[in-house]
Image (cartoon, coloured by chain):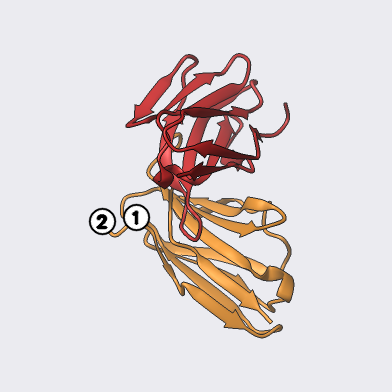
Chain colours: A red, B orange
Amino acid sequence: ILNVEQSPQSLHVQEGDSTNFTCSFPSSNFYALHWYRWETAKSPEALFVMTLNGDEKKKGRISATLNTKEGYSYLYIKGSQPEDSATYLCAYSNFGNEKLTFGTGTRLTIIP
Amino acid sequence: DAGVIQSPRHEVTEMGQEVTLRCKPISGHNSLFWYRQTMMRGLELLIYFNNNVPIDDSGMPEDRFSAKMPNASFSTLKIQPSEPRDSAVYFCASRPNRGETQYFGPGTRLLVL
């Protein structure tokens, strides 16, 4: 993996269902992995920053895990609500370069 | 804190005109980032500053783009002359320290006719 890749690109989920999606990133020289939530016509809002292999973070119904050895992170949403509809971005940085490289996002739509 | 402040929020200009976008980072944050969002390329970093010093401007598209940070509380991104392909949303973000989250401003929606 040379860049940050997110899958799927888009997702439709029934209200009340749980869902998850993936962020893949280069595993060498890893420094930090960020998750952002981005609603249409707004600015990206930070969800989590994770740095250690095995990290798990939780914020309400949203949680994330990190595997730096294999280069992936999962974002989970439990009991989806309409207000969860947004694009979820992950971003990666390594030791050699402190700037963030963003994935193209997963666009989540919750169906009422 | 009011968060990252950007102005103007919307800008419509004609090709060839100079455009100046402004950003006030969150007080106490050491780093400032300028991003551009387009449908084709997503969110791409243009330039970032640490302690008011430009660190990496490799994302600046060409010489028509320039950015300054004269002090810790103000930065500008200037496009001169502007072209229609510069139409995009430009975000400014600031960060307390390396490894910490970046906080994004509301963005400036630029339309060059």
Tell me the quarter of the picture where residue B85 sits: bottom right
In the rendered image, residue A31, in percent from the top left (x then y), is placed at: 53, 27
Q: Which residue is rendered at x = 44% and y = 61% of the image?
A: B106
Dot 1 or dot 2: first in sequence order is 2
Q: Chain of mark 2?
A: B
Left or right of B113 on screen, residue B48: left
Q: CA distance from mark 1 to mark 2?
A: 7 Å
Q: Chain of mark 1?
A: B
Residue located farthest toward the left when viewing the structure as drawn: B1
- Foreground residue, A74 or A15? A15
Q: Which residue is rendered at x = 53% and y = 36% of the image?
A: A13
Q: Quadrant of the C terminus of chain B?
A: bottom right
Residue designated by label 1: B26
Give the amino acid type for the residue marked by disc 2 in the picture: Asp
Q: Which mark is residue A30?
A: none
Residues at marks 1 and 2 touching, judged by CB atoms closer than 8 Å: yes
Residue designated by label 2: B1
- Foreground residue, A41 or B36? A41
**Residue A79, can we see it?**
yes
Tell me the quarter of the picture where residue B100 sits: top left
Q: Residues within 10 Å of mark 1 (few under 14, many from 20)?
A: many
Give the amino acid type for the residue marked by disc 1 in the picture: Ile
